[in-house]
Image: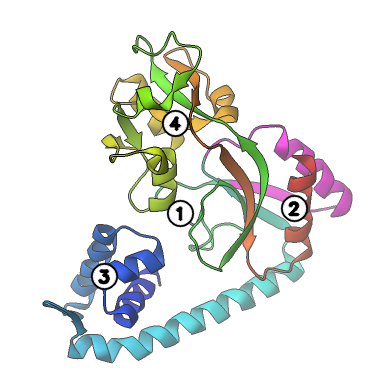
Amino acid sequence: MRDLRYFVAVAEELSFTRAANRLHLSQPALSKQIRQLERTLRTSLFDRGRTIGLTASGAALLPHAQQLIVQWDQARRAVTTAASTSDTTLTVGFQTSIGRGLIPAVTARMAQDLPGWRLTFRQIPWADPSVGFDADEVDVAIAWLPLPADDTLSSKVVTVEDRWVALPLGHRLARRKRVPFAELAAEPFVALPASSPALRDFWLAADHRDTPATVAMTAGTADETFEAVAAGHGVALLAAGNAELYQRDDLVFRPVTGLSPSQLAVVWRTGDTREAVHIFTAACCRCA
């Protein structure tokens, strides 16, 4: 379904650049997925000349792909509705440790307002900018903003935290109490995957740079990020609360000046009116 959504976006925009912007993907990542779909179908879907056009195969696929996407969305909503009447489990997605006393407080509130319900947790890799929603892996999530800028997900900020930096032991800035971002900007960085462009740019502080960041390597999870930093491959920005949660002997964490703060949010599907989702999101905001 993801590849069909990508195909439809390119077919409707007749531009890989516009489709990538619409999908909040990098253009190379989108092109790679379209080529994979073409290999699967054993045919070319687009004429890639000076302008983009549909081949006969692409034109034949388009109405069916559009219909399948609509039917899948309807099926997913039907399953969600059916599950809400029988399931008493809420799956919470996350990409970094939640901490901050949030989950014990929310669990207590859920026990009070929805007896018999329980929370389960699923860690989602950085490569998925939807935090598990696109693959129907989660019901709600605790996630760092920004999210993909579309109307499928809703969010409320639960905490705002300064950005810090993770440095390897012995780094030239490790003895500083605070690190101006201007002194970090030229350092090699450990980056999030290109498939999460908005979040990747945020944690590279792209909006505070005059020139693009030097990316030493890409990490798929927070643990991979800190292993790479400890090995000396680069530095990485993180939220102040995570600096406490991920303390380890081979890293140094320091606050960074000159950057806007990070925002941790509770996220849910727009239009998901289940009582459990409403109580969870409200509890996150109250408890934070």
Query: 10 Å neighbourhood of mark 1: few (<14), some, or many (≥20)?
Result: many
Cα distance in 3D space between marks 2 and 1: 21 Å
N-terminal label among 4 and 1: 1
What's the amino acid at mark 1? Pro
Q: Can you identify the residue that label 3 sits on?
A: 16
Measured as percent of width and height from the top left, residue 121 is found at: 61, 46
Is 146 within the magenta? no
Which is more foreground, mark 4 or mark 1?
Answer: 4
Cα distance in 3D space between marks 1 and 3: 19 Å
Measured as percent of width and height from the top left, residue 169 is found at: 38, 11
Task: Say whether residue 204 is left or right of residue 281.
Answer: left
Q: Is residue 17 above or below residue 203?
A: below
Q: Can you identify the residue that label 4 sits on?
A: 237
Mark 4 and mark 1 in contact? Answer it, CB < 8 Å: no
Q: In this view, does 227 lie above or below 138?
A: above
On the image, which quarter does residue 211 sit in?
A: top left
Q: Quadrant of the N terminus?
A: bottom left
Q: Can you identify the residue that label 2 sits on?
A: 280
Q: Which of 99 and 147 is in front in this view?
A: 147
Query: 10 Å neighbourhood of mark 2: few (<14), some, or many (≥20)?
Result: many
| Magenta part of the chain | 96-121
N-terminal label among 1 and 3: 3
What's the amino acid at mark 2? Phe
Mark 2 and mark 1 in contact? Answer it, CB < 8 Å: no
Measured as percent of width and height from the top left, residue 220 is found at: 38, 41
* Residue at horizontal 63 percent and vertical 59 percent from the top: 268
N-terminal label among 3 and 2: 3
Measured as percent of width and height from the top left, residue 164 is found at: 50, 26
What's the amino acid at mark 4? Leu
